[in-house]
Image (spheres, rainbow, N blue to C red):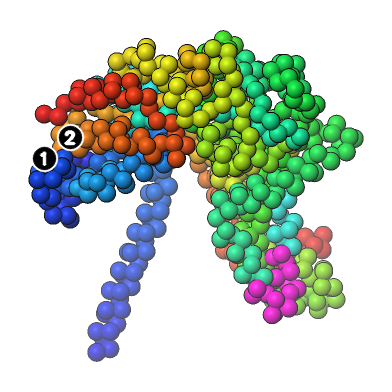
């Protein structure tokens, strides 16, 4: 960690110290500050957008984000080779205890997972329910005209066609969110497959990355997979509505995903380690999740800590408007308020 | 003046020898260091599973159970299939270029085969997804019923799977095998061919003589291709379907060692899981090392010993 601090100390120096009169939050020394973070790939587009936008506003603050994966991000945070980590799933208790100091979670944006499919001759939106999705993943539903699917979709003529399920082959937050949801719906899924970023899938083909899954579904008649909505839209693949806990069939969009977070906000734990799959609320989309940034409560480098807290205030405020364009959903206001309060816990002195 | 020149020449010689020697040693150190590091980083998994790691089929990150057998199977199966497909073609190319092709065609052909080796594997993967997989799926959909009973052709027509992976691997291996086989054939002394012609051999018979003379080198070339196929990651993971199962079916999605490391390493959150992935790396490293050593030894054994001896045994065996 000394090395990291030294690298940061030497990292700046190119720009002249900005005058302290502006609204720019001044860095401790007035020199430019470089902050390194690493973690999940899923929020990488918006983090990159945020850091570049923020750098325009505050040229003295440079934030580098390396999308190395949630697991690697958490490992780097624990070994203190980066200032902040980022993850699509909250850190587990044993990971928290193995960290050298208390770690705080801050939700940054919301993401959703949608069931995408390629079904020749069917143009309307299909409806899915948790038990049906669990049945597909567990290999119990193998035909498109399975009675369970037919029952959910009256008025759509489902063909007698084999259903090939495609999942992510790489460990992924997207997989974690889906598994988290199916685990709540289906005890069998929870006990036989379990909830994690990489799973022992009972059936199906593994494709690499969201783009791999989308590519497979686009090409393969009769296939069904899951991706973030942005990939379905980009590739013009149909995705279905999913029945939520109130019994309504909801399609994922920024409104319904934010609604899921708002539904969960009421019972938000102080450390923000919360799952919002199958959240309560009439309009809540059920397969949704926060993605988190991870900070030490008592960081070594106070100048970086100060700059990062200022960055977070901006990201949770003005920064949220970039979310929907990049395929994410903005945080609901009550969650933002709670987080602004929680930011005060980071020790800046 | 002349003495000075000789002296500085000797110093140059020494520097050159020590310098290149250091690089040579460095290479050995790197290989050993990789081996040690892989061993060290997979301690947890080695302790927990021992030999069971090689022999069990379950790969369950959630439950913390790790067995490498399906990945070892997938790696060896896909590589062997790739060799079966690529070797005849690669040898055909090598023979044509070194023995038959007119001079004006030789250079372009050599250039094109080597170009195949320069294409990045992600490009092969993309080509595989967009061109090869749909073709393979068509083939799978149209498999005649009588063929479906054969264990090689069972399973739903997914397109991605062992067949697609083996085909793309074959294409990727061809330039390696054919370039080396071509060089080996060129190393066959012209006198061999002339002697064959003098004895009244036809062109085909003369080429067979040359092939026989170069056999160890050609086997070495094939083995190098095998080593290449074992380690190929990106294109394979894009096409093989990434499902750890042991089956003969060419249509079934399977998995390789390199692919599972590439896929799961970044999101491996707990230590045992990470150690298990590194141990897969260790297994792959060991297998690749063994294969490369064998192939190298074969190539050396052809080039090193006195040539006439080999030629004589060849002739003697031919006669017998």
Question: Mark on residue A306?
Answer: 2
Q: Residue at x 51, y 30 (%)?
A: A253
* Magenta segment, prevailing SS (helix, strand or loop): helix
Q: Quadrant of the N terminus of chain A?
A: top left
Residue under circle 1?
A: A28
Q: Residue at x 66, y 44 (%)?
A: B165
Q: Residue at x 56, y 60 (%)?
A: B118
Q: Position of residue B295 (x, y in %)?
A: 59, 52
Q: Residue at x 75, y 42 (%)?
A: B137
Question: Mark on residue A207?
Answer: none
Q: Name the side, left or right, on which A19 lies relative to A229.
A: left
Alpha-carbon neighbours of circle 1 within 10 Å: few (<14), some, or many (≥20)?
few
Say whether marks 1 and 2 touch (CB < 8 Å). Answer: yes
- Cα separation, mark 1 vs mark 2, equals 8 Å
| Magenta region, residue range | B93-108
Q: Disc 2 sits on a residue from what chain?
A: A
The one of B197 and B122 positioned closer to us in this rendering: B122
Q: Is residue A3 above or below residue B312?
A: above
**Magenta highlight on residue B103:** yes
- Residue B214 quadrant: bottom right
The one of B139 and B9 positioned closer to us in this rendering: B139
Could you tell me which secondary element the residue under label 1 belongs to? loop
Q: Name the side, left or right, on which A157 lies relative to B63.
A: right
Could you tell me which secondary element the residue under label 2 belongs to? helix
Q: Confirm whether residue B54 shows in the render.
A: no
Q: Earlier in the sequence, mark 1 or mark 2?
A: 1
| Residue at the extreme top | A187
Q: Disc 1 sits on a residue from what chain?
A: A
Q: Confirm whether residue B263 shows in the render.
A: yes
Alpha-carbon neighbours of circle 2 within 10 Å: few (<14), some, or many (≥20)?
many
Q: Is residue B172 above or below residue B268?
A: below
**Magenta highlight on residue B305:** no
């Amino acid at each position: 960690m000394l090395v990291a601090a030294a690298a940061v100390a030497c990292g700046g120096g190119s720009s002249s110290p900005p005058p302290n009169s502006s609204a720019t939050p001044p860095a401790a020394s007035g020199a430019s500050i470089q902050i390194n973070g690493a973690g999940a790939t899923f929020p990488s587009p918006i983090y990159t957008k945020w850091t570049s936008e923020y750098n325009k506003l505050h040229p003295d603050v440079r934030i580098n984000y390396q999308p190395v994966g949630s697991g690697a991000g958490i490992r780097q945070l624990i070994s203190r080779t980066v200032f902040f980590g980022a993850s699509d799933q909250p850190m587990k208790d044993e990971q928290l205890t193995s960290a050298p100091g208390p770690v705080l979670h801050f939700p940054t944006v919301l993401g959703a997972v949608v069931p995408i499919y390629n079904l020749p001759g069917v143009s309307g939106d299909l409806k899915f329910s948790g038990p049906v999705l669990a049945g597909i993943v567990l290999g119990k539903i193998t035909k498109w005209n399975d009675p369970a699917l037919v029952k959910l979709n009256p008025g759509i003529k489902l063909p007698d066609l084999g259903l090939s399920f495609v999942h992510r082959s790489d460990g992924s937050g997207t997989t974690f969110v889906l598994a988290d949801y199916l685990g709540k719906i289906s005890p069998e899924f929870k006990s036989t497959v379990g909830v994690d970023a990489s799973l022992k899938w009972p059936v199906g083909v593994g494709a690499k990355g969201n783009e791999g899954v989308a590519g497979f579904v686009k090409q393969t008649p009769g296939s069904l997979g899951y991706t973030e909505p942005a990939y379905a839209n980009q590739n013009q693949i149909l995705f279905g509505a999913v029945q939520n806990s109130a019994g309504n069939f909801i399609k994922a969009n920024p409104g319904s995903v934010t609604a899921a977070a708002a539904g969960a906000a009421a019972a938000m734990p102080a450390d923000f380690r919360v799952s919002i799959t199958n959240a309560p609320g009439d309009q809540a989309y059920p397969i949704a999740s926060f993605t988190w940034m991870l900070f030490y409560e008592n960081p070594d480098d106070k100048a970086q800590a100060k700059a990062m807290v200022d960055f977070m205030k901006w990201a949770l405020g003005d920064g949220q408007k970039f979310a929907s364009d990049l395929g994410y959903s903005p945080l609901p206001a009550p969650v933002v308020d709670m987080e602004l309060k929680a930011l005060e816990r980071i020790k800046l002195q | 003046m002349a003495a000075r020149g000789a002296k500085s020449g000797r110093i140059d010689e020494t520097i050159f020898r020590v310098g290149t020697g250091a690089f040579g040693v460095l290479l050995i150190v790197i290989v050993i260091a990789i081996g040690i590091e892989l061993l060290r980083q997979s301690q947890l998994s080695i302790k927990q599973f021992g030999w069971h790691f090689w022999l069990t089929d379950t790969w369950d990150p959630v439950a913390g159970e790790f067995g490498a057998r399906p990945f070892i199977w997938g790696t060896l199966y896909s590589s062997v299939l790739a060799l079966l497909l690529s070797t005849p073609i690669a040898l055909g190319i090598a023979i044509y270029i070194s023995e038959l092709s007119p001079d004006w065609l030789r250079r372009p052909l050599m250039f094109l085969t080597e170009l195949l080796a320069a294409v990045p594997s992600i490009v092969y993967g993309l080509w595989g997804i967009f061109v090869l997989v749909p073709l393979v799926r068509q083939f799978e959909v149209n498999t005649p019923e009588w063929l479906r009973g054969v264990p090689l052709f069972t399973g739903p027509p997914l397109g991605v799977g062992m067949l697609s992976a083996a085909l793309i691997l074959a294409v990727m291996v061809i330039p390696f095998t054919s370039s080396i086989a071509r060089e080996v054939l060129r190393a066959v002394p012209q006198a061999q061919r002339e002697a064959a012609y003098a004895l009244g051999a036809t062109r085909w018979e003369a080429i067979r003589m040359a092939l026989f003379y170069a056999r160890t080198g050609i086997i070495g070339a094939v083995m190098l291709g095998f080593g290449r196929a074992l380690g190929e990651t990106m294109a394979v993971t894009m096409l093989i379907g990434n499902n750890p199962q042991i089956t003969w079916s060419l249509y079934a999605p399977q998995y390789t060692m390199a692919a599972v490391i590439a896929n799961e390493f970044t999101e491996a959150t707990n230590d045992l899981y990470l150690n298990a992935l590194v141990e897969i790396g260790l297994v792959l490293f060991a297998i690749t090392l063994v294969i490369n050593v064998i192939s190298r030894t074969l190539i050396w054994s052809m080039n090193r010993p006195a040539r006439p001896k080999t030629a004589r045994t060849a002739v003697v065996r031919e006669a017998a």
